[in-house]
């Protein structure tokens, strides 16, 4: 697929909406710019959890995906791994 885009005076470019949606790029998304010879390659980076300060506390405001993992099971597995062997 090929897209022609224009860079503005500030050096910004706009990624077309259908590509942003396909690659999960939202406001504040980070993209790595790699120079390969005479080419520039954009690579989406994994999304970091958005944070917000609420009443003096830094709160993660992301939503969890329902991947079926129970935090209690993960916690117990980690505790078991740390427990001294008998």
Image: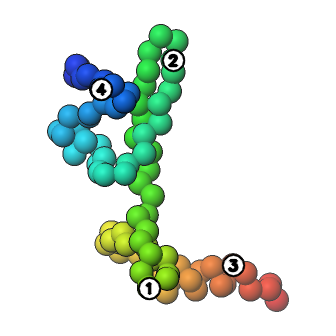
- Mark 2, Cα crowd under 10 Å, few <14 / some 14-19 / many 20+, is few
Observer-nearest of 69 and 26 = 26
Q: CA distance from mark 2 to mark 1?
A: 46 Å
Q: Tell me which numbered mark, 4 or 2, is placed earlier along the sequence.
A: 4
The label nearer to you, 1 versus 3, is: 1
Residue at 42% from the left image edge and 45% from the top image edge: 30
Q: Which residue corresponds to mark 3?
A: 81
Q: What secondary structure is found at the residue carrying circle 1?
A: loop
60 on left or right of 9: right
Q: Identify the mark at residue 55; answer none if there is no mark.
A: 1
Q: Which residue corresponds to mark 4?
A: 8
Quadrant including the C terminus: bottom right
Residue at 26% from the left image edge and 22% from the top image edge: 6
Q: What secondary structure is found at the residue carrying circle 2?
A: strand
Q: Tell me which numbered mark, 2 or 1, is placed earlier along the sequence.
A: 2
Q: Tell me which numbered mark, 3 or 2, is placed earlier along the sequence.
A: 2
Q: Which residue corresponds to mark 2?
A: 36
């Amino acid at each position: 697929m090929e897209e022609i885009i224009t860079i503005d005076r500030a050096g910004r470019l706009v990624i077309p909406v259908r590509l942003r949606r396909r690659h999960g790029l939202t406001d504040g998304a980070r993209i790595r710019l790699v120079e390969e010879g005479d080419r520039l390659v954009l690579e989406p980076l994994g999304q970091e959890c958005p944070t917000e300060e609420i009443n003096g506390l830094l709160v993660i405001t992301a939503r969890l995906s329902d991947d079926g993992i129970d935090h209690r099971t993960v916690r117990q597995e980690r505790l078991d791994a740390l427990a001294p062997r008998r």
